[in-house]
Image (spheres, grey):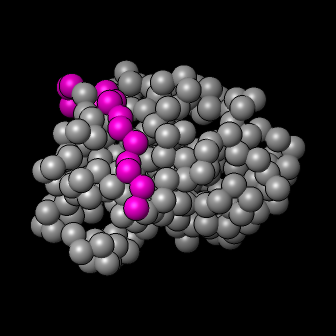
Amino acid sequence: MIPSVSRSTVQPGQEAPDFLLPLVSEEGQIALDDYRGRSPLILALLRSLWCPFCRRRVTQLAETRQKLERAGVELLAVTEGRTEPLRKYFRMRPPRLRVAAGADPEAHIYRAYGVPMPASTPEYKELRATVRINPTGEAPEPMSLDAVQTWQREHDRFGQIPEDQLDQLRSIRPDFNNIHAGHFLIDRAGVVRWVHIEAPIDDLSRYGIFPTDDELLAALRAAGL
């Protein structure tokens, strides 16, 4: 079993952990209390923009936001990148949704919500090397996780900045190597109603695959929101 340094993932029915984060899509800060009592929230916890899948996800979520808003639900994306490089990127590519930075040294929001954060162990590195994935269906064939990310960075149209590579190197730490994205539906009372985790720490076959708009809207209906 590959260990994780995060606690168990927050489950439906549990109170959503509070947060206060700097916005990178605009000036100011954002907190869970800004939504409490006002609107349900889809909270998307993503990797930094060095990851081509999460860079693309931010672009996709701009369209998702419009559908959610028609259903009376707000959307907040969080990336683990550093605040100023993220602001630089989003000045170049305005995201059309609210995006916050979760780049404190201890990755508190990721730990609080319990997204998988596998440690830099030989077992995890072997898993990254042996898995074969093609999550967007664009690569010529399934590849190892690192190889398909490299291919995607070379071929996608979602832009990148020089700081991306530095953030990627900073993310490889002794205590955790990576963050597996999580999407959480939180109701007006601040209770988690639905959870989607990109990939468990011991199975990377769904790495880079995020919930579709239809899945998000179905979660809203199932929760009665």
Please report the residue visible at 54 percent of the width from the left and 39 percent of the height from the top.
111
Give the x, y percent position of residue 45.
44, 47
Tell me the chief SS of the magenta region: loop
Q: Quadrant of residue 79?
A: top left
Give the x, y percent position of residue 34.
19, 39
169 shown above or below 3: above
Q: Which residues fall within the magenta stretch?
A: 13-28
Q: Quadrant of residue 161?
A: top left
Is residue 130 shown to the viewer in this render?
yes
Is 32 inside the magenta-drawn segment?
Answer: no
Please report the residue visible at 25 percent of the width from the left and 28 percent of the height from the top.
29
Please report the residue visible at 26 percent of the width from the left and 58 percent of the height from the top.
187
Q: Quadrant of the N terminus?
A: bottom right
Q: Is residue 131 left or right of residue 187?
A: right
Is residue 160 shown to the viewer in this render?
no
The one nearer the camera, 134 or 28, is 28
Q: Quadrant of the C terminus?
A: bottom left
Q: Is residue 52 left or right of residue 191?
A: right
The one nearer the camera, 125 or 42, is 42
Please report the residue visible at 43 percent of the width from the left and 32 percent of the height from the top.
102
Give the x, y percent position of residue 142.
69, 68
The mark total stands at: 0
Q: Is residue 96 left or right of residue 99?
A: left
105 shown above or below 92: above
Give the x, y percent position of residue 224.
24, 75
Q: Is residue 64 left or right of residue 135?
A: left
